[in-house]
Amino acid sequence: MTTSAKPHAIEVNNLVVSNGDVTAVRGVSFTIPQGGRMGLVGESGSGKSMTALALMGLLPMGWNTHGNILHDGVDLVTQSDKALSSRRGRTLSMVFQDPLSSLNPVRRVGDQISSVIRRHTGADRKVAEAQTIELIKQMNLPRPEQLVRAYPHEISGGQRQRIMIAMALACYPQLIIADEPTTALDVTVQKQVLRLLNGAVRDRGSALLMITHDLPIIAAMCDTVAVMYAGRIVEIGPVQEVFRNPRHHYTRGLLDSQPTMDNIALDGSSRLVSIPGMVPPLHSLPTGCAFNPRCPAATDKCRETMPELGSNGVSAACWHPIQTAGEVAAQ
Amino acid sequence: MAIYALRKLAFFLGAVFVASLAIFILIRAAGGNVAAIVLGKDATAEAINALAHAYGLDQPLPVQYFNWITNMLQGDLGQSFRTKESVADLVTARLSVSVPLALSGLLLGLIIAIPVGTYAARNVGKPSGAVLALISQIGIAVPVFWAGILLSVLFGVKLGWLPTGGWVDWRESPIGAIRSLVLPVLSLGLIMAAVLIRYVRSAVLDVMNQDYVRTARAVGMTRTQALLSVGLRNAALPIVTIVGLQIAELIGGTVIIEMVFSLPGLSRMILANVAAREVIVVQSTVMLIIIFVIFVNFVVDLLYGVLDPRVRNAA
């Protein structure tokens, strides 16, 4: 597992997340090398956020994790809340979707950042406050000396998310998980916040796990991408390869349903397609490949046996992977 | 914050004014001829007129109201018709019983309710949480006088540890005064706690599921640390609201407890004076209690502003 010379930022083996009735994540494995960037895409309910929360050890009450999550020399699955808490915010940290609800409403933002620094570095108040100001400057926020004294409701959404990012990055973590960090923001500031996150992660040499349903963000920020469907990774590989030659029919569907200048026509003759059907509820998944009821290429085999990643020599969990133009020509 | 406090102060003063009008109208204007009521039905017309004149009761009602208010502002709450004692003196003597009783009862209620409610919230869905919810439910159903009688029977009669009732003045023996307050405070506090536990539990349950508690954990707090330092701080808002609302309940509770334990408190004094038709005494003391309740709510509003930056900015 961790036999490679350079340890990974995180290595996830056969992760299962369930609460007794429902299994939200059904055997997910991936690794992110030091400084690597992986995108995790999928529709709502595909298990992306549950995967992220499981890595952090922040699952809601009643949810259990099985499998291994190797990070910084330990298996996080076996760690107590206390042991995990000493890593959270220090070696791995997370940026959440909605910065307004994620920041403590009754505490000044500067105190929220400096308390993270003090907790993990043991720095005294003065030092931590100076570092906080410095961090806020790095986040391209105006008037840091005044901003530290603001409460979350007094600043804009984009500023709040920068504060969240500053908190997450304060202790130079090995891995940062960003769960749809711009979904709750105005379109005009999304790009700025992403650019900032991108730069700050690069400056620290941290690895990034970017969770989003926005494929262009993955294309711009990540080197690998994993596509999740109904609690499983159905396709994984280098971003360029997966996006150019998707092997799984679900990945193809996701790519086709992204609006671009090409497929949106103003005269209404839109070529934007959507994937037929709906994500199956987790408590009544179809047998075989979970995507088979919505898949254009489904056969009896797909309805009977669940494909694994690599079953067919490609990095997609599909019995009938999409062939590239080259492969078609070769036949 | 200053603007917020001033607004709340104006509201407080307005509420006191409206309350004073309401009391005056209810007790005086609607009550008929005060002098006749005080003297009873056998009194002569001359006696009634003489009393009315002596106490200014023959003046027009607005003038009487004005006099009452201006005298109150100068600390003169009027005097008893029969004993001629000043109401201010009567009240001060009784406050040394009622104030420690009510405040200790409330404090005990909070001291029990905050940890127990928090524990119940953390163990929701588990047997221990369910048992606590059940006990709290039973506590709410138990009338405060019944709790008082049970405690009095157990600790006073069976075990003989504490007096079953009566009062030793603070000047006579502070320990004696405390001993006579223990069981009343316990009865009041336990019943308060039973009610408050439910609110603390639901307030904590609510904040436990907030994103910011998860964030606190995401940057290095354990579940317990996040709950205690971030969760409880935010849960303080609904808890303070409920405590403010419970003040009226608390005063109702002291009336009953003072009766059960025969304590010479303010509530018993009012009841006795209602029976004796001491209109002025009742009017002034009830006004004092109402001012107290409004004042507590004013303090609660101010606390809101202190606890929640969003509240003081919105004002």
Image (spheres, coloured by chain):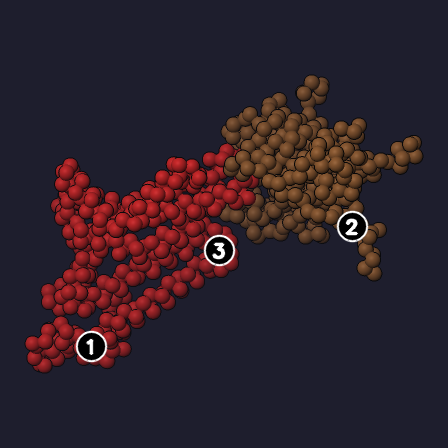
Assign a secondary structure to mark 1.
loop
Q: Position of residue B198 (x, y in %)?
A: 38, 47
Q: CA distance from mark 2 to mark 1?
A: 83 Å
Q: What residue lies at 44% left-to-right and 39% top-to-bottom?
A: B125
What is the chain letter for disc 1?
Answer: B
Label ID, residue B311: 3
- Answer with the quarter of the image where residue A48 lies: top right
- Looking at numbered disc 3 in the image, what kind of residue is underneath it? Val
Residue identifier under label 1:
B32
Are discs 2 and 3 both within one chain?
A: no
Instruction: Specify whether residue A140 is in view.
Output: no
- Looking at numbered disc 1 in the image, what kind of residue is underneath it? Gly
- Looking at numbered disc 2 in the image, what kind of residue is underneath it? Val
Residue closest to the eye, A22 or B120: A22
Q: Colour of chain B?
A: red
Residue identifier under label 2:
A273
Q: Position of residue B275 (x, y in %)?
A: 15, 65
User: As drawn, is B140 to the left or to the right of B78?
Assistant: right
Are discs 2 and 1 both within one chain?
A: no
Given this view, does label 2 or label 3 mark the residue nearer the observer? 2
**Relative height, residue A222 to residue B110 (above, below):** above
Q: Colour of chain A?
A: brown
Q: What residue lies at 31% left-to-right and 57% top-to-bottom?
A: B248
**Relative height, residue A85 to residue A282 (above, below):** above
Q: Position of residue B36 (x, y in %)?
A: 13, 76
Q: What residue lies at 10% left-to-right and 67% top-to-bottom?
A: B82
User: As drawn, is B30 to the left or to the right of B5?
Assistant: left
Assign a secondary structure to mark 3.
helix
Q: Position of residue B72 (x, y in %)?
A: 25, 66
- Answer with the quarter of the image where residue A309 lies: top right
